[in-house]
């Protein structure tokens, strides 16, 4: 495990058993998160971002198959954890804010009951009174008005933005080392998105919690993170400090993503990335982006590229154009 790494994923593959065969979704994912670091993962819908995060928490569906790879958390092997170790991981080590707060909250229990159950599962709070006080404190931290009333409400009685703040309160109700936020601003209007992101940034900074932020929004990634991984079709294709990635994108897919951003000043329609993510039941043998890449070479269809150093500090790219190291092959 790398020195100072809180989370390290090595060569992780995740397949799903489906009618007719296997969907080979993740194909050798590598990712490292240091203590106190804010990491973003960006990429198209269906590229495997959420699957990667579920592997950290060991909450993959039953039809998932893990043919190879390793997930380390604080030096411990997550994929080998059982019983109490898993409870400690989920209750005290890692918290996850899911994309849809409506699906994440149970409609038949009050907000207070659900937050107190999370606190109980984490073995925090001595009794019901202490757990209630901790729940109220978490709701106040999440900037929810009138937390006493919110405690007695059911999820359907709250707005989308309030439900998302309840999910944040649940995630941060007890001390956690890592917070995973899976598209936490989906389905929220722009004003509420900004409020939720500001809240998350403040709480993460105050508590010293590491953050993994999954997002489709490159603007959110630029604002919220220190390091960005670009993911395509179950593989990481580029990683760099946030400012460097936006100033000097190298992988053809990253360049395409950035060109897809609409410009406030006009200047024509965003170019986008032609084509679509490959069929996971029969993915390309080499680089999975090769069928969509205008700079693809013969080797791209034959061999999967490893990460190559590009000369920038912490900037690496999985592309045969950079096999010589530090500069593109022409």
Image (tube, helix red, strand yellow):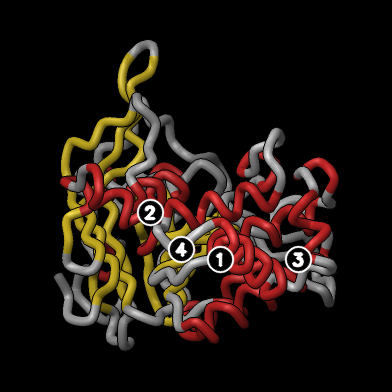
Kindly state the secondary structure of the residue where label 3 is placed: helix
Residue 32 percent across, percent down from the top left: 29, 69
Residue 143 percent across, percent down from the top left: 75, 73
Q: Residues within 10 Å of mark 2 (few under 14, many from 20)?
A: many
Is there any visible trace of residue 144 in the rendered image?
A: yes
Q: Nearer the viewer, mark 1 or mark 2?
A: 1
Residue 185 percent across, percent down from the top left: 69, 59
What residue did someone put label 1 on? 130
Q: Residues within 10 Å of mark 3 (few under 14, many from 20)?
A: some
**Image side of residue 308 versus residue 182, left or right:** left
Depth check, front residue: 250 or 27: 27
Q: Nearer the viewer, mark 4 or mark 3?
A: 4
What residue did someone put label 2 on? 90
- Looking at the image, which residue is at 63% across and 56% down? 167
Q: CA distance from mark 1 to mark 3?
A: 32 Å
Q: CA distance from mark 4 to mark 3?
A: 35 Å
What residue did someone put label 4 on? 126
Q: Mark 4 or mark 2, which has the lower sequence index?
A: 2
**Image quarter hosting the C terminus:** bottom left
Residue 20 percent across, percent down from the top left: 35, 11
Kindly state the secondary structure of the residue where label 4 is placed: loop
Q: CA distance from mark 1 to mark 2?
A: 21 Å
Kindly state the secondary structure of the residue where label 1 is placed: helix
Q: CA distance from mark 2 to mark 3?
A: 26 Å
What residue did someone put label 3 on? 193
Q: Mark 4 or mark 3, which has the lower sequence index?
A: 4
């Amino acid at each position: 495990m790398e020195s100072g790494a809180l989370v390290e994923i090595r060569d992780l593959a995740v397949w799903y058993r489906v009618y007719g065969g296997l969907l080979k979704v993740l194909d050798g994912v590598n990712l490292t998160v240091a203590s106190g670091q804010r990491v973003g993962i960006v990429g198209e819908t269906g590229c495997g971002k959420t699957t990667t995060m579920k592997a950290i928490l060991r909450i993959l569906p039953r039809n998932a198959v893990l043919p190879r790879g390793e997930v380390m958390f604080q030096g411990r092997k997550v994929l080998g954890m059982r019983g109490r170790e898993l409870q400690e991981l989920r209750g005290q080590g890692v918290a996850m804010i899911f994309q849809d707060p409506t699906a994440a909250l149970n409609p038949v229990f009050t907000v207070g009951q659900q937050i107190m159950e999370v606190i109980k599962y984490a073995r925090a709070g001595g009794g019901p009174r202490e757990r209630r006080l901790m729940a109220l404190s978490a709701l106040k931290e999440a900037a929810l008005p009138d937390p006493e009333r919110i405690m007695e409400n059911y999820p359907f009685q709250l707005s989308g933005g309030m439900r998302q703040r309840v999910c944040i309160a649940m995630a941060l109700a007890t001390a956690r080392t890592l917070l995973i936020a899976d598209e936490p601003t989906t389905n929220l209007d722009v004003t509420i998105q900004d409020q939720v992101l500001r809240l998350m940034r403040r709480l993460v900074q105050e508590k010293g919690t590491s953050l993994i932020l999954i997002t489709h929004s490159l603007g959110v990634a630029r604002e919220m993170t220190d390091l960005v991984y670009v993911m395509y079709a179950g593989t990481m294709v580029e990683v760099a400090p946030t400012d460097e990635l936006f100033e000097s994108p190298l992988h053809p897919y990253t360049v395409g993503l950035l060109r897809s951003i609409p410009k406030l000043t006009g200047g024509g329609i965003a170019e986008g990335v032609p084509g679509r993510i490959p069929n996971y039941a029969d993915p390309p043998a080499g680089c999975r982006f090769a069928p969509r890449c205008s700079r693809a070479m013969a080797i791209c269809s034959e061999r999967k590229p490893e990460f190559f150093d590009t000369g920038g500090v912490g900037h690496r790219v999985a592309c045969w154009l950079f096999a010589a190291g530090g500069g593109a092959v022409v």
